Amino acid sequence: MNIIGNRFKKQSLVSVATYFFIFAVCAKGIYFYEIQHPSKEDLLAIHGIVKEMRLGGQGNATTLKVESVYGTHRYSSYYGIVWPGMERIKLGDQVNLLAERNKLNKNELITGKSYYMWELKYGEEILISYEDIRELVLDKEASINHYINLWLAASFVFLLIAYIRKIFLRWR
């Protein structure tokens, strides 16, 4: 126990900078994993009956629980947008969805599989179009990538300064 305590007390500027840099590289790796969205043809096509519905808005996703041949699963909209016409959907109505599995759902064992809606058809009307969602997701991901890149660059500069300082202190 004392060895672990001493190790944490002896953190150097280089080790702290290394941790920040590794954390930024991990964030970039998660970003690359999360941006791999399937094409429209590769999305899961669902035809089912709405069993439960919760309209979102202001950052809360609209959620539909839909029963289909694949089972009853939760389908959420991106970024809490309530698309025009969604309020007309009632329990027991039939919907058609194009969905992508939520790859980062950490509670899947408890809550079951969850999916993101890329397209929602209600009757003959398209309430959520694939093209609109794609544009929305790409814009949001570009913004997130910008901040990850800033963090990565800042942590690299911090690491570089820490190494230069370490080398300079050794020459003294």
Image (tube, grey):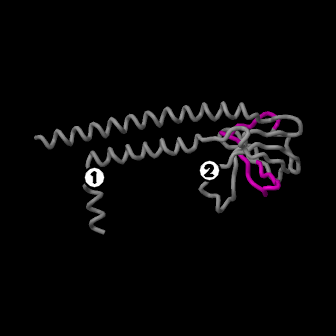
Query: Considering the numbered disc 1 on the image, is that residue within a helix, a strand or a loop?
Result: loop
The quarter of the picture where residue 58 lies is top right
Q: Quadrant of the C terminus?
A: top left
* For residue 109, above or below residue 166: below
| Amino acid type assigned to the residue bearing label 1 in the image | Gln
Number of the label disc, if any, that sits on residue 157: none
Decide whether residue 138 is among the magenta residues. Answer: no
Q: Position of residue 66 (x, y in %)?
A: 80, 51
Mark 1, residue position: 11
Q: Earlier in the sequence, mark 2 or mark 1?
A: 1
Mark 2, residue position: 103
Number of residues whose C-alpha sits closer than 10 Å to that of mark 2, classed few (under 14), some (14–19) or many (20 or more): few
| Amino acid type assigned to the residue bearing label 2 in the image | Lys
- Work out which residue is located at the far front of the displayed protein and give it: 41
Query: Considering the numbered disc 2 on the image, is that residue within a helix, a strand or a loop?
Result: loop
Question: Residues under labels 2 and 1: Cα distance?
Answer: 35 Å
Q: Position of residue 60 (x, y in %)?
A: 67, 43
The quarter of the picture where residue 136 lies is top right
Instruction: State left or right for residue 23 relative to residue 113.
Output: left
Rendered residue at 63%/35% (across/down): 137
Rendered residue at 25%/41% (across/down): 163
Instruction: State left or right for residue 83 relative to residue 94.
Output: left
Rendered residue at 17%/38% (across/down): 168
Give whichever of 63, 46 is nearer the camera: 46
* For residue 64, above or below residue 39: below
